[in-house]
Amino acid sequence: MKIKIKGFTLVELMVALALGLIIVAAAIQLLISGQSTLSYQKAMENVQDNANFGMNYITADIRQTNLDLGGRIMKNSKLSGLIVKKENYPSAMTTTDLALSSTSTGDSLANIKSDVLVIQYKPAQLNGFDCEGKKVTSATTVVVQKYFIRKDEKSKNDYVLACAAGHYDSSAVTPTLTDLTSSSTGQVVLQRVDQFKVLVGVVNASNQMSYLTLKQFADAATTIRPVTLQLGVLIRSVDNSGGNTVIPASYTLLNNSYTVSNPTGVTGKFLRVPLEQTVAMRNAIGDAQ
């Protein structure tokens, strides 16, 4: 009597094994792809949130530039809301360590150093706060704010955009700037900023407009007047955006190209987004007062 045994042939088993391996490989590929997409989306979300909240905060403050300082016509040679020279402070100022705007003098992860922006204004309302959270309690207080890149205190190899603030009494015969020196670290406004650049929109006597760097404006003729500021920041994601992220050879910010490297000791690919904002200095537009 013959016993019949039914089962798979060797060929059928090999085909089934191959199909199983293909299905497993496809599942793994989908998992890896999904993880890469998630990393990229998280990086983009971080950059967007950082940029939206931080830039809105900065532009709101910059719109106050030159508020109630005595006249709408700002120049580089007299009391002005945009500070590029010591002449933009009160002439009787006793402080010698004065904060000044400058071009390509600050920290940066780019091939060119970052800019420093300094503005001043008299708050419209009492009991408000400057960019560091210090309360303004006097109607004669002038707030001076300095925007600059520095190292992150929580991560020494990363950079942040910070704002340091000081005050002086505009009614004093010899005003003194307090709480703001060259060593002031300020408060963090934007995290992971690799570059910060500023252009000044100026008009001449013929009402023709052009854009200058802060240094060019400081060295320019006294007949021009600033009316807008263009801010440019290169923001980097906090987390690695994934191995599939395409890293550009350079980034364009305010019509200039910059190459950027990762901080010392940091590896991986990070999402970087150039962000530009043009802010009209409302208190510098209009006829002379």
Image: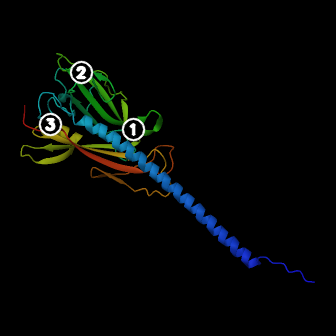
Q: Residue furthest bottom?
A: 1
Residue at image location 43% in from the left, 56% down from the top: 247
Q: Position of residue 205 (x, y in %)?
A: 7, 43
Q: Nearer the viewer, residue 67 or 125?
A: 125
- State which quadrant residue 30 falls in: bottom right
Residue at image location 21% in from the left, 32% down from the top: 85
Lateral position of residue 230 relative to residue 29, left or right? left
Q: Identify residue for label 1.
A: 160
Visible residue check, residue 194? no
Label located before the other in sequence (3 or 2): 2
Q: What color scheme is it?
A: rainbow
Point out which mark residue 192 bears: none
- Which amino acid, mark 3? Ala
Q: Identify residue for label 2.
A: 168
Visible residue check, residue 174? yes
Q: Is residue 146 above or below residue 266?
A: above
Q: Position of residue 264 (x, y in %)?
A: 48, 43
Q: Identify residue for label 3.
A: 284
Q: Residue furthest front?
A: 1
In whole angstroms, how far apart are the C-alphas of marks 3 and 2?
A: 21 Å
Q: Position of residue 240 (x, y in %)?
A: 49, 49
Quadrant of the rendering where the N terminus is positioned: bottom right
Label located before the other in sequence (1 or 2): 1
Mark 1 element type: strand
- Which amino acid, mark 1? Val
Lateral position of residue 286 relative to residue 265, left or right? left
